[in-house]
Each structure stands twice: as C-alpha cells, then as structure tokens.
C-alpha cells in the first residue's frame, strides 16, 4: 500500500471550489420549492458541490471505516468494561453482529474494520485490516500515551487507507471507533484543545457511575499536568493523550480532505479525532460533516470548537460510527435534491412574483 506522509497530505488540502458552490447555491434558489425551504439539506448540498468541484455532485459509493485500539489508562479504573471487550467486539464487527453492522446494512454501506492498536493478537480474517501502531497505548497518567513516531504512524496509516479507498471509488466516508477507555482519551484531548476543565468534558462513557466520572476527570487532569501537551500542536496532543484509533481516524479525515471527499464525523471519539485533524490542518474542517450530537459531555464542545453543526440529535452515545451511518442517508438525500429536482423553468411551474 502506498504510504503518504502527513506533510504531503496537509499540503494537498485546499479550499473548497467557490465557483461550484456559487453555481449550486444559485440552482438551489431556482428549484421548485420556496427558497431555503429544505433547510440544512440545501447547505449540505452546496458544501458537497464545493468538495467535489461539481455543480451537481453525486454519491455513488459509501464506505465506513471503523478503527479499533486499546488504552493503557484503563488500569486507572476509568472504564466500566474490561479491556478484553475491545478484541471481542472487533470479532463481532467482522461477524456482522454489532449495531454498526445492522445500520450499515440498512444504509447499504461497506464497513472496513481496522486494527489500529488492539492489545491482543487478533486471528486472521479476510475483512480485517491490521495496521497497529502498537499493542495498546501506554498509561497517559504515567507518561505519554505513545511516542511521536507512533503518533505519526497511526495518522499516516489512516491517510493511506482513505487514499486507497477513494482511489477505488469511495465518494463518502464514515468514521467509527472501538476501544475500551477511549472516552478518557477523547475527554483529555477535548479538554486541552478546547481549553475546558476535564470535569466539564468527561461523561459516563460506557456506563460508569457519577463518582467514577469525577475519578475519571481527576485521572485526566493528572495526565494533562504530567504531560503538558501543546494545545496548538495536534500531533503533540495525540502523542501525550491520544489513542491509536483516534490518530488513525484523524488520518482518515485528513486523507479524505486531501483527496476532495466528504467525511462524516461520528460521536465523541470521532470528534476528538476531528479536533486532532483540525488542529494539524484547519482547512480540513471544510470537508467534515458532523453526523450527530452525542450525549457525551465533550462532544458538543468539540464540534463548536471546530465550527461544525450536527445533522442529528438522537440521544446516542454508542460510537462504532452508528450516527455517521444514519447521517449518510441525509447527505445522499441532499445531493439528490440538488441534482434531481428540476428548476421552476425546467418544470414549467410559475415562480413566485
């Protein structure tokens, strides 16, 4: 597989096509409907035009990239589930039995499962991509979660997978995650980059109690004080506090932006990955679409920091990319309305006077 450097990728991320967006906006205003009546669908379609550099963009091939990784910080008692659940769930994804598999079948999207750093020897499987940057991260409460080299590796692995899939025809990419302990890493990343106290961005994860939430926030505070990550340096934040799957997804987002394709941000973990990608390259934001608002406390802060407005608000907090899968239908609908609806003139319908 062709390896693409982080620097080369960032250099290839440019602004959206303003001419295509202007043409799409003008067409939206002429379609047989009151101007602006399709609300957010109109906004999405115009942004898709800018991303694809096409006046009437079409989405033919959807994929969903689900990255899994483990976190050394689980030894601090921050999770309700044991770390063994991560490899067990990976096998469940491959067997087609998880929530993301059900929803992916519903929206007709192919799921790509990636071992970005699971702390287990996973058995070979034809549908598993093995690209671990390590066998789980180190305990961030005792030092950096990973080395700088590992941080760069997991990002560039994500870039490479995105580039490969887009080269093969992917038009829309969803992002998803799995990793016991990853809400701790996501909360830490969000706290640092958004400059918010850890307790304000730390939620209940997979089901911890309120007193455990406070303990979790204290562990995060300890990790931040010990590692002193630079909030303006996404690579440094990932190194000190992140997870391999978070870095991998950040790479997917950067790779999609460089290739001129939209990427759907899922929930809190994908939101933390988006913060890393945005901090590394702010221009990547224009290619991100926020699928939904997670009930995890930090997710709304992450989206607000980047400047993204979520499509859905369903009270979800599962991860796996479940929100991203659902939002794919809406993004597709937005593109189809722009491309397939006639204008007043084309339909022979009188416009308002």
Image (tube, grey):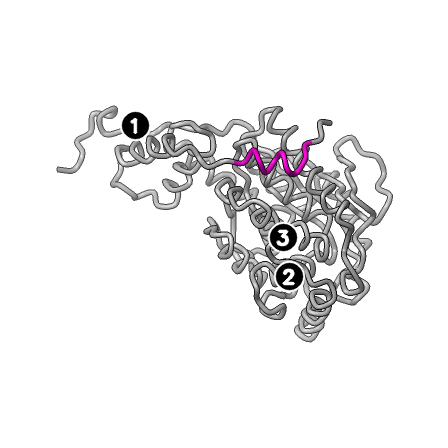
**Disc marking residue 17:** none
Does 350 appear in magenta? no
Asked which secondary structure carries label 2, the reply is helix
**Residue ID for mark 2:** 187
Could you say where residue 192 lies in the image, as x and y percent from the top left?
62, 61
The outermost residue toward the left is: 353
Q: x, y (%) of residue 65? A: 65, 39
Q: Earlier in the sequence, mark 2 or mark 1?
A: 2
* Quadrant containing the C terminus in the rendered view: top left
Residue drawn where x is 33% and y is 34% of the image:
22
The residue labelled by disc 1 is: 342
Residue 208 percent location from the top left of the image? 69, 67
The residue located at (55%, 39%) in the rendering is 263
In the rendering, which numbered label is found on residue 233? 3
Callouts 3 and 1 close, C-beta under 8 Å? no
Q: CA distance from mark 2 to mark 1?
A: 46 Å
What range is drawn magenta here? 4-13
Mark 2 crowd level (few <14, some 14–19, many ≥20, 10 Å Cα):
many
Q: Main secondary structure of the magenta part?
A: helix
Residue at x 49% of width, y 29% of height: 59
> Label 3 to label 1, Cα distance in Å?
47 Å
Residue farthest bottom in this picture: 211
Quarter of the image for the N terminus: give it. top right
């Amino acid at each position: 597989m062709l390896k693409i450097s982080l620097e080369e990728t960032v250099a290839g991320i440019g602004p959206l096509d303003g001419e295509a967006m202007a043409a799409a906006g003008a067409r939206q205003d002429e379609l047989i409907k009151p101007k602006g009546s399709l609300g957010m669908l109109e906004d999405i379609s115009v942004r898709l035009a800018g991303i694809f550099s096409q006046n009437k963009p079409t989405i033919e091939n959807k994929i969903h990239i689900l990255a899994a990784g483990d976190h050394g910080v689980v030894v601090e008692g921050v999770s309700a589930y044991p770390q063994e659940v991560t490899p067990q769930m990976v096998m469940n994804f491959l067997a087609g039995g998880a929530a993301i598999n059900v929803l992916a079948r519903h929206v007709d999207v192919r799921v790509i499962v990636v071992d970005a750093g699971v702390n287990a020897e996973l058995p070979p499987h034809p549908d598993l991509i093995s690209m671990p940057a390590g066998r789980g991260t180190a305990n961030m409460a005792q030092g950096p979660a990973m080395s700088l080299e590992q941080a760069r590796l997991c990002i560039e692995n994500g870039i490479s997978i995105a580039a490969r899939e887009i080269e093969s025809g992917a038009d829309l990419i969803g992002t998803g995650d799995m990793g016991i302990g990853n809400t701790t890493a996501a909360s830490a990343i969000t706290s640092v980059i958004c400059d918010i106290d850890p307790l304000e961005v730390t939620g209940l994860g997979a089901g911890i109690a309120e007193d455990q939430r406070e303990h979790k926030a204290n562990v995060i505070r300890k990790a931040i004080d010990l590692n002193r990550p630079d909030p303006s340096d996404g690579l440094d934040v990932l190194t000190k506090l992140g997870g391999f799957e978070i870095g991998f997804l950040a790479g997917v987002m950067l790779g999609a932006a460089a290739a001129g394709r939209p990427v759907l941000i899922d929930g809190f973990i994908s939101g933390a990955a988006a913060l890393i990608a945005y901090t590394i390259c702010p221009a990547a934001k224009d290619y991100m679409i926020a699928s939904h608002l997670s009930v995890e406390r930090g997710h709304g802060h992450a989206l607000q920091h980047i400047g993204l407005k979520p499509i859905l608000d369903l009270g979800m907090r599962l991860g796996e990319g479940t929100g991203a899968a659902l939002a794919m239908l809406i993004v597709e609908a937005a593109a189809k309305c722009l491309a397939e609806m006639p204008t007043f003139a084309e339909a022979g319908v009188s416009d308002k006077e």
